Amino acid sequence: MIQIPNINISIIYPEIIIFITAVIILLVEIFSNGKKWYAQSIIALIGIIVSGYAVSNQWNSFASGFSEVLVADNFALMFKLIFLLGALLTVFLSIWYFRREEIQQGEYFFLILSSVIGMMILSSANELITAFLGLEVMSLPLYVLAGFDKKKLLSNEAALKYFIMGAFASGFLVYGITFIYGATGTTNFDKISMVISSRSFGIDPLLLLGFILILIGFSFKTAFVPFHSWVPDVYTGAPTPVTAFFSIGPKAAGFAILFRLIIKAFAPIGGSIIPILWILAVLTMTVGNLIALTQRNIKRMLAYSSIAHAGYLLISLVVGNGRGASAALFYLIAYTVMTVGAFGIVILLGEKGEKDLSINGYSGLAYRYPAAAVVMSLFMFSLAGIPPTAGFIGKFYIFSSAISKGFIWLAVIGIVNSVISVYYYLRVVVVMFMKPEIQAGRVVCFPVSLMVAIILAAIGVLQIGMFPQGWFEAVRYSLIGLF
Amino acid sequence: MQLAIFIIFAILCIFGSILVITLRSAVSSAIALVFVMCVIAGLFALVGALFVAALQVIVYAGAVMVLFLFIIMLLNLKEELISEDDKKFTRFLGIVLGTAFLFELAFFVRTALMRGSEALYEPVPKTLSSIAVISSELFTKFLFPFELTSVLLLIAIVGAILLAKKKNEK
Amino acid sequence: MSLGLAHFLVLSGVIFAIGVIGVIIRRNAIIILMSIELMLNAVNIALVAFSVYMRNMDGQVFVFFIITVAAAEAAVGLALAVVISRNRKSVDVDDFNLMKW
């Protein structure tokens, strides 16, 4: 006789809302003729906001469901809000961009939203197979999105490269899951941790092998060095709003699942994992920053800088306690707004086809469009970690969490790295304000939707930077029940 | 007896896998892969996992590989051109990395098995596999991942159609 | 000696490594995709072996999921190959030289 499991469907309401929205957009695409791009974008925005409301309703409920494969603790909910914020800003970035590029296909919003479903499932997965399927639901739309500009060969190549790397990484990931299943007989995080701590003899090598393979899989997805080689090409080739989405969504989702794995499932063998993560963190920060120094193309520069930011976030993973996790959440919120803002300005200043994205193309921008130059400088300051911006507080929080746990060297390397990064971020500012205008006649129009995204991001950067207290509280509350 | 069959299957399987990655033409590689999948299905049947063996043949070797062959024929791929000079390094690197990875795996698996007991070499009970058990697991313990696969397949359909359809000129 | 878990794990490891080598050395996108399928098949061998030896059916359920995922991935990957070959008459990865370091 089949035992009916505890389903508790209410914990996936946010995902269901997003999925229904995505399907409605698809139906609109099929059954309506004429102009529907704006209608679809508005449906997407409404869906995201309603889903955000559903997420906030679950706050402090600590529910779990579907035979414990999903949990909706505050930690997962906070991540879901970050993904929804990222998706909201990405939709605002996209409305005008795809109009300019003349590829207004409604499937775009379907793909963005279904990728968000995958991220949300990744953040609340409490079981490895669910996490794996969530990862695939997240990645599959991303492969298509990278190649969304079908006529552009650069975009096609980006998609193929991303796809091959992603599928390769999934192979490692499932192999890792297999070994963990083999070593413990289960894939549920709580049970894995119970099995590990009940063993009397040290660490099971199969378990360690499984963890390393899983880490390799997620390292490809979140672009840790040395698994980052696809990042610059894919980030450059994909349409710019998609690039912005790449650098915020999958990264945050990867950290969500890695945190849950390390804090819950592998807590008993945490000691032997830390050195691996330590090396990964140092490599990711340093290599990302050093290569970013040499970049001439703004999208490539932002790609390498996103690798470096993943390195800072890895520091908080090494710290691994409540302080580290809250620092990571705070940094991810700050990183989301500042990255979206920077990409928004790149879209604003680009021309159709985006043939020229060199940093030097921005020279003299301050004379022609002072407001755009000032806002771009704000985002660059924030990415570099200069007060009074969100980036500064975020970095400060991460480094101080490292010091409080005794990882002095890691904090020192992180600080040195962020000093290096100041050089290439400030170069953009210098070019805009100090260099004479070479490219006469760069005409910029200011579309409403894009301005909304940029202004929201700018306000976010300043608000988080100057009044971080409320955000600290929210982040701290989101860790209840995790430790 | 079981061991003898396993060894024959394993040798066929490894031989086929090597063919998949070394054959020049994509069609031959795909045929070799179909062969490998069928042999693996045989291995599953050997240990009594009959349902999975059937899945392997019907879905994997049948549907997925037919899709591969279909696309290869459709694109009419020319044989892979390999200019020797610049590919040697990647080849070398690939083989070194792959072998290193294999040794690493072997090391871990060996240490793990040393810890385990002789029980690992016990013959397998044949009664375990049944569709009833698998299906009840799918609809209870793994209900959510099971439902999630439908979302995954919808995304794959939309994505594949979106990419492959020709632009309808307006 | 009778048939044991170790035999299956060794076979699985060998096939996985062959798949990894294939992904690294081959330049044809479709053959790379087939090498990835090879890796997933290696995973299936290990899963079934663990499942049978631990007398726990979860592993065989996972095989079901992995086959589904492989099918979905293959559909998207092959569609990408079609798009690219339409834009350009080859699918060799090394032909893509628009993007450099």
Image (cartoon, coloured by chain):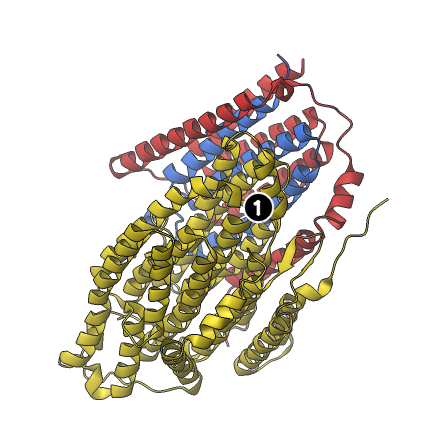
Chain colours: A yellow, B red, C blue
Judge from the rendering whether residue A271 lies leftward or rightward of residue A187; answer left or right. left
As drawn, A268 above or below A84 = above
Q: How many labels does the image show?
A: 1
Is A147 in front, or is A330? Answer: A330
Residue at figure coordinates x 58%, y 74% from the top left: A52
Image quarter of residue A369: bottom left
Q: Is mark 1 on a helix, strand or loop?
A: helix
Is B79 in front, or is A117? Answer: A117
Judge from the rendering whether residue B75 lies leftward or rightward of residue B45; answer left or right. left
- Give the chain letter at badge 1: C
Residue lying furthest right: A1
Residue type beneath disc 1: Ala
Judge from the rendering whether residue A237 lies leftward or rightward of residue A436; answer left or right. right
Is B4 in front, or is A180? Answer: A180
- Across and down, in percent, residue A28 comes to 62, 76
Image quarter of residue A316: bottom left
- Across and down, in percent, residue B33 comes to 54, 34
Q: Which part of the image, by quadrant, shows the N terminus of chain B?
A: top right
- Across and down, in percent, residue C84 comes to 42, 55
Is B34 in front, or is A20? Answer: A20
Residue at figure coordinates x 74%, y 58% from the top left: A7
Does residue A149 appear in the picture of this structure?
Answer: no
Where does label 1 land, which residue?
C70
| Crowd rating for badge 1 (residues with CA inside 10 Å; few <14, some 14–19, many 20+) | some
As drawn, A401 above or below C15 = below
Does residue B63 appear in the picture of this structure?
Answer: yes
As drawn, A389 above or below B79 = below
- Across and down, in percent, residue B3 comes to 63, 16
